[in-house]
Image (cartoon, grey):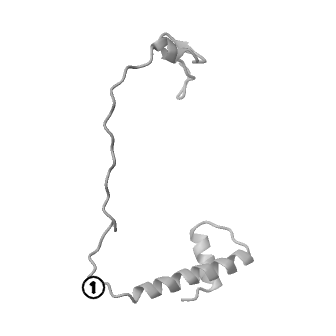
Amino acid sequence: MILSQEEVNHIALLARLGLSNEEVERFREQLSNILENFAILQEVDTTDVPPTAQPIPLQNILRQDDVDSSLPCEEVMANAPRREGNYFRVKSVLGKS
């Protein structure tokens, strides 16, 4: 399927893209090639192929959590630019406090 320049301009308008004439021509060729490849794929017989969302089985690879001791509070807070007790002091995000 060969796209026209008007169709590419319409697609660019829908995508809110401003394209130069050179870009329209380049995208016209590229999009036409993509559509031709999809047309070839449409010809493949898939009657015996079940629909799938994932072609390969998914597998989570998890490790066991290691329980370890925490760092001492003073060591954690040593490089804090501002602190208030055992807490980091940060600037207010939603308003003055």
**Residue 71's image quarter?**
top left
Q: Amino acid at mark 1?
A: Thr
In the picture, measured across the screen, residue 96 lies left or right of residue 64, that is right
Q: Residue at x 46, y 14 (%)?
A: 73
Query: Would you place residue 37 above or below residue 67 in this image?
Result: below
In the picture, measured across the screen, residue 31 lies left or right of residue 45, that is right
Q: Position of residue 28 (x, y in %)?
A: 63, 81
**Residue 68's image quarter?**
top left
Q: Residue at x 46, y 87 (%)?
A: 39
Q: Nearer the viewer, residue 59 or 32?
A: 59
Q: How many marks?
A: 1
Q: Position of residue 92 (x, y in %)?
A: 55, 24
Q: Nearer the viewer, residue 66 or 42?
A: 66
Q: Residue at x 53, y 89 (%)?
A: 1
Residue at the extreme top of the image, as rendered: 85
Q: Position of residue 43 (x, y in %)?
A: 40, 89
Q: Nearer the viewer, residue 49 or 94?
A: 49
Query: Would you place residue 14 above or below residue 69 in this image?
Result: below
Q: Which residue is mark 1?
A: 47
